[in-house]
Image: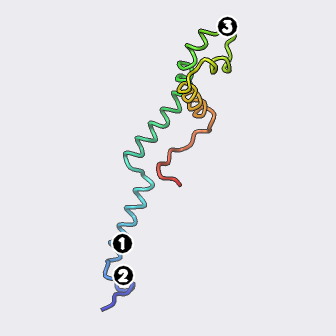
Amino acid sequence: MAHGIGDGELRGVAVDDVVEGVTADVRGRFQGSPRSTLATREYMRTLEKAPEALQRLLAPFMEQLTRKTLGNAVELMSEDERSELERLLGLMIEPPRRFTAYTF
């Protein structure tokens, strides 16, 4: 016997079960999992600490220079140090945005 929407079932699956599953899925997406919440907090901490990390990165180079400019400090840096400088500057320059793990 074929089931129709009017009798509370859709193709043998109870409508209440479908609604309950969809509701749980949607609620989970809006609330976020504990893992994504942790990642969001870690991302925000990284943003907050970026200025201090930048100061710590630049301090040894600035001590060596008589003319203390960012360009002169960059000339003394290794490639890895320059990459870290770019990452920190990117965190400070880009406007903060909510961490979204699975956004395409």
Q: Is residue 56 above or below residue 2?
A: above
Q: Is residue 32 left or right of residue 63?
A: left
Residue wearing tag 3:
66
In primary-sequence order, the first of circles 2 and 3 is 2
Q: Is residue 92 above or below residue 72?
A: below
Label 1 SS: helix
Q: How far apart are marks 1 and 2 (CA)?
A: 9 Å
Q: Where is the N terminus found, in terms of image quarters?
A: bottom left
Towards the viewer: 79 or 97: 79
Q: Position of residue 44 (x, y in %)?
A: 50, 36
Q: In this view, does 23 lie above or below 100?
A: below
Q: Is residue 38 left or right of residue 95?
A: left
* Apparent side of residue 58 relative to residue 40 in the rendered image (left or right): right
What residue is disc 2 on?
10
Instruction: Using a 10 Å C-alpha cutoff, classify the residue at mark 2 as few (fewer than 14 neighbours), some (14 to 19) or many (20 or more).
Output: some
Q: Where is residue 30 in the image (x, y as percent from the top left)?
A: 45, 54
Query: Tag 1: residue type?
Result: Val
Tell me the kind of residue under disc 2: Leu
Q: Name the residue under label 1.
A: 18
Residue lying farthest top? 66
Q: How far apart are marks 2 and 3 (CA)?
A: 78 Å
Q: Nearer the viewer, mark 3 or mark 1?
A: 3
Judged from this view, the residue extending furthest toward the bottom is 1
Alpha-carbon neighbours of circle 3 within 10 Å: few (<14), some, or many (≥20)?
few
Q: Which residue is drawn at 61% across and 13% down?
A: 62
Q: Residue at x 32, y 72 (%)?
A: 17
